[in-house]
Image: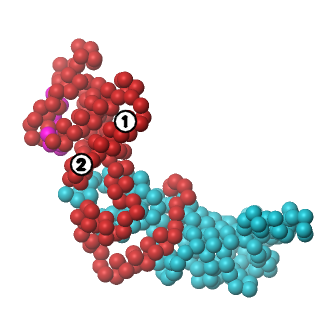
Amino acid sequence: MTEKGRIVKMVSQDQEEFEVEYGVATMSTLIANVLQDVSEETTTVPIPNVNAQVLAKVIEYCRYHYEAKRIDQSEEDIERWNKDFMKVDNKTLFNILIAASFLDIADLLDLGCKTVAGMIKDKSVEQIRELFCIEGDFTEEQEAKMREENNWGSEMSQENNAAQ
Amino acid sequence: MSVDTLPYDVQRMVLERLDAHSRLTMRAVNKSWYNVFNDFPRWESVRIEAGQASGNEGLRSLLAAIRPRKILVRGRVLTPELLGVLSGSPLLEELSFAFCGFGSELDVSSLGTERNSSLKKVSFVGNRLINADSLQALMSAQPSIIELSSRTEPKNAAEMFWAAPSREWVCTRDPGTGTISSSFTKSGGSAFH
């Protein structure tokens, strides 16, 4: 069977099956590696860490980008689509990130991390805790020390990349 | 579900996509992010601008966390305590001051109070020249320093128009023999001088 016509069946954690074109499925480095190691007759790939709702979103991303590359979609259109794609609640966003990390889809992982970073930018510690439902677990002394450090941090900028 | 449920590598990738200020803010959110931040490689270079932050202990512990290779301080008032904390930053190799204010004569001796064996270059650029004796005294106090300089430079276009010639003292240490030598140069200046 040629790779062009090949269909891969992805099975989510909750046993839902998704039939996906080979080129779309192999945007995941993990799936590409799995398919390389098995015979051509193998078409089913279990994705035990990702539920159907999240897997559907991930496949939606891969399908769009596979097609966008094929038809040479403009950067502007892709950017607009990415922005809309990331308009999800926090829980879905984090699950997409976890799935992208597990499936090793570098572009989706980058997009998700940039989205989270964009949500964090210019917010205070308290605002970030509220936004992401995080409980502070420092002692009062540690909090005070951190505040003093961050006073300096607000007047500090990083000039270039980190050294090793 | 919280952002803390993200795997370590993903948390780290999020931090990498933040500017320095947001990264430092995220570090103060909770212990999980604090730990991810602290596993970062040391920072290559930071710039400290003029501002209101005070309390040298805060700066000392922040520098210990980010361990920059190079620090550029611009437009701050330099006190001997601040000089001591900056020069004591762990693994610091270069320290530069640009247009920083100080009293009638900058007491650079505090640069040597917190011995820092990694510190190799210190430079001052501004409207005033630090005298060669002070620079030489500091070179003696901090054996790791191989180059120490003070240069006058106009701050803006107006100053440039009226500027006196640029003057510079450079003290260097021969790494082989340990001999300290200093040189003075004078260049440029407007037609009015």
Name the image quarter holding the C terminus of chain B. bottom right
Look at the numbered disc 1 and give the secondary structure of its residue: helix
Q: Where A126 falls versus B137 (above or below)?
A: above
Q: Amino acid at mark 2?
A: Val
Q: Position of residue B47 (x, y in %)?
A: 57, 65
Read off the magenta span. Answer: A44-52
Output the letter for the chain in red.
Answer: A
Chain letter for mark 2, please.
A
Instruction: Give neighbour class at mark 1: few <14, some 14-19, many 20+ (Cα, 10 Å).
Output: some
Q: Amino acid at mark 1?
A: Ile
Q: Residue furthest bottom?
A: B104
| Secondary structure category for the residue under label 2 | loop
The residue tagged 2 is A88
Q: CA distance from mark 2 to mark 1?
A: 17 Å
* Res B148 → quadrant: bottom right
Q: Is residue A112 left or right of residue B19?
A: left
The location of residue A129, given as percent across then percent down, is 28, 67
Residue placed farthest to the left in the image? A15
Indicate whether A85 appears above or below A135: above
In this image, B90 relative to B159: left or right?
A: left
* Residue B92 seen by the camera: no
| Residue beneath the point at 48% across and 65% down | B66
Q: Which chain did the image draw in cyan?
A: B
Q: Which residue is mark 1?
A: A78
Q: Residue at x 42, y 56 (%)?
A: B18
How is the protein colored in the picture? by chain
Along the polypeptide, which appears first: circle 2 or circle 1?
Answer: 1
Q: Residue at x 28, y 17 (%)?
A: A4
Circles 2 and 1 in contact, beta carbons < 8 Å: no
Q: Is residue B105 above or below residue A129?
A: below
Is A80 part of what is drawn in magenta?
no
The spot of residue A7 in percent (x, y) is 20, 22
